[in-house]
Image (cartoon, rainbow, N blue to C red):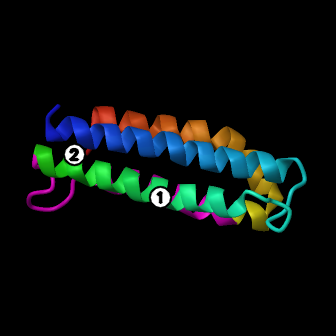
Amino acid sequence: MDRYGIYRQLHLGGLFALFMALGAIALHVVNGGTRASNTGRKLIASLHGIALFIVLLGGFGMLARLKLAEGGLPTWIYLKLAIWGVMAAMGGLMYRSPKVARWMLVALPVLGGIASYIAVTKPG
């Protein structure tokens, strides 16, 4: 497997772990759980952080292999970074605002679909 393929696998594996961690937090909060009552909080928070790092590592690794970052990042990269920024913030925000957790169960697949569309079509 070439380096691009390795970075792609890292990126996708990180995405699966990220969505799993955010889904776990959302489900816990929607069911009335709090930060204090979540016995797996440290594990889920660690998974969330590590997954975000792996997503970025794989994504920027693919950019480097494709030489897309030469002369500045394309606009579509900024769009994807904005989506991942939202997902990074959601880990803690759902505990602070349980209404957000209910919406995240719908928003997560939508955000993932938008990010996927951006990655495939590379607008701008």
Residue depicted at x 55% and y 55% = 47
Observer-side mark, 1 or 2, equals 1
Mark 1: few, some, or many residues within 10 Å (few <14, many ≥20)? some
Query: For mark 1, what is the residue?
Result: 50
**Along the horizontal axis of the image, is 88 left or right of 121?**
right
Residue depicted at x 34% and y 43% = 10
The secondary structure making up most of the magenta span is helix
Query: For mark 2, what is the residue?
Result: 62
Q: Quadrant of residue 23?
A: top right
Query: Which segment did they paint magenta?
Result: 67-92
Residue type at tag 1: Ile
- Residue in front for this viewpoint, 28 or 81: 28
Q: Look at the picture and state if 13 lies above or below 29.
A: above
Quarter of the figure that contains the N terminus: top left
- Residue in front for this viewpoint, 99 or 31: 31
**Along the horizontal axis of the image, is 34 left or right of 114?**
right
Q: Earlier in the sequence, mark 1 or mark 2?
A: 1
Whether residue 63 appears in this view of the structure is yes
Residue 85 within the magenta-colored segment of the rendering: yes
Q: Which mark is residue 119?
A: none
